[in-house]
Amino acid sequence: MNITPPTIIQGGMGASISNWRLAQAVSRLGQLGVISGTALDGVLTRRLQDGDPEGLVRRALEHFPFPGMAQRVLDAFFIPGGKPKETPYRKYPMHDLDGRREPLELCIVGNFVEVFLARQGHTNPVGINYLEKIQMPHLASIYGALLAGVAVIIMGAGIPLTIPSVLTALTRHEPAEYPIYIAGKDGKSETFNLRFDPAQFIEDIPLPEMLRRPDFLPIVSSEALAAILLRKANGPIDGFIVEGNLAGGHNAPPRGRVPLSETGEPVYGPRDVADLAAFREMGLPFWLAGSFGSAEGLKRALEEGACGVQVGTAFALCEESGLMPEARHELIRLALAGESHVFTDPLASPTGFPFKVVELTGSLSNGAVYQQRQRVCDLGILRQPYRRADGTIGYRCPAEPADAYVAKGGQEADTVGRKCLCNALIANAGMPQRLADGSYELCLITMGDDLTEVGRFCKPGSLDYSAADVVRVLQGTSCG
């Protein structure tokens, strides 16, 4: 690895839950702070429309290497003083396979801004986490993060075989390609090699120097997946995060036939437990994730030969997190009262992966609330390309209106129980879209199974704790 392997890797959660403030706080403590790379184009546009009250986004843009691009983003989205509360956020363009300039520029700039801000005030490494399933923004997003000096790329929810060559190319400002899954009109899948050429975005200024190549850490659920990556990836793998099914967010599906429990959750068995001896034999650094957020968990991971642990839930509820304070406090209160509950929902995510949902009054975790929401696909972060009968490319998402999805050749059964994670995750960070009837998009919060134990980080009588408190407890020191 190019960096010293940290003991604690902070999870890259949600959309702007693992924001620059949280990543900066963890990195300042000598551990690896990690930004969520999900929807940073949308997060950027909403911060600017809210007026960028502290001026931090605009300060980051002053350091962006391509001033013309930064100015175009400001001209399109910055509202001095912020938009009126009752005014909806302006929609930003969805990604597609045509390589349109505006969505790509927003991705480059959004990723640059987040990494740049996370790196301020210290010299320690900062990482960024992407979901492989959100494929179309990858190349532009990674390039923006590289321009800001990101030190580690983490990727889960898929098998990212070509990311190593992407990193090599983009650090040299050379063209890169990424294979995009397309659902075929005959039920078979195909791939399209999406191409991104930095030369099309570099302005008429001296070419930036070769960028630092970050370490690449895929998130895997098994030694079999790790072996595939080592055998088939088109470049170096620098280590693995080995994530079990107790972790928050998306979980790997159980291997083999997927039975459901009496409560409707996927049932995991012995085949779904990673063989850590196999990881030790691979000779690469690895970290354990999924209910390892305690001093005992860290000790257990080190005894297994891991470099340390990745921790999400504990950091998602700390003061520096981007999660809405009222939701954060309520979840901590429920945990302290022994009333929190996390459900592994096999249907919620449009990706088809199981997704952990924490029950919270008024959120989309409530069935009645979910049924009242009018389905709409206006962000398109998780939409997938498909081949139409006439051979052209269309886009669809099983969380969009069911009749629209079926009209695009999808199966109605695939729409049942699907929730719009795109809108919900951004709502979690306090930037919900205002709807035509005056209401707002609602949140849907994910946490790991160790939500019940977050009281270990709180001081007596308090519903708040900091990233420093999390690190101290994990390292075996009481918060006092």
Image (tube, rainbow, N blue to C red):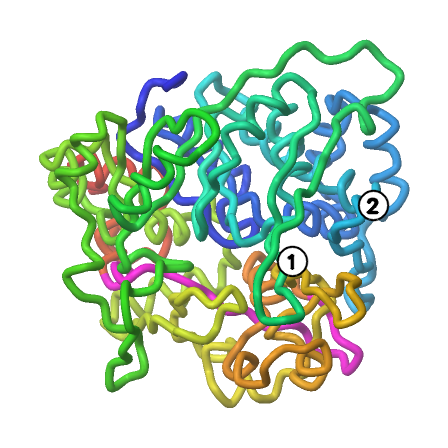
Q: Which residue is drawn at 80% across and 78% down?
A: 436
Image coords of residue 139 (percent x, y): 65, 37
Dominant SS in magenta: loop
Residue 440 falls within the magenta-colored stretch: yes
Image coords of residue 442 (percent x, y): 59, 73
Q: Is mark 1 on a helix, strand or loop?
A: loop
Residue ID for mark 2: 100
User: Which amino acid type is marked by label 1?
Assistant: Ile
Image coords of residue 124 (percent x, y): 44, 20
Residue ID for mark 1: 381
Q: Is 269 rendered above or below residue 11?
A: below
Q: Residue at x 81, y 23 (%)?
A: 202
Name the side, left or right, on which 237 lies relative to 295.
right
Name the side, left or right, on which 352 lies relative to 470.
right
Residue 380 falls within the magenta-colored stretch: no
Q: Are marks 2 and 1 in contact (CB under 8 Å)?
A: no
Mark 1 crowdedness (10 Å alpha carbons): few <14, some 14-19, many ≥20: many
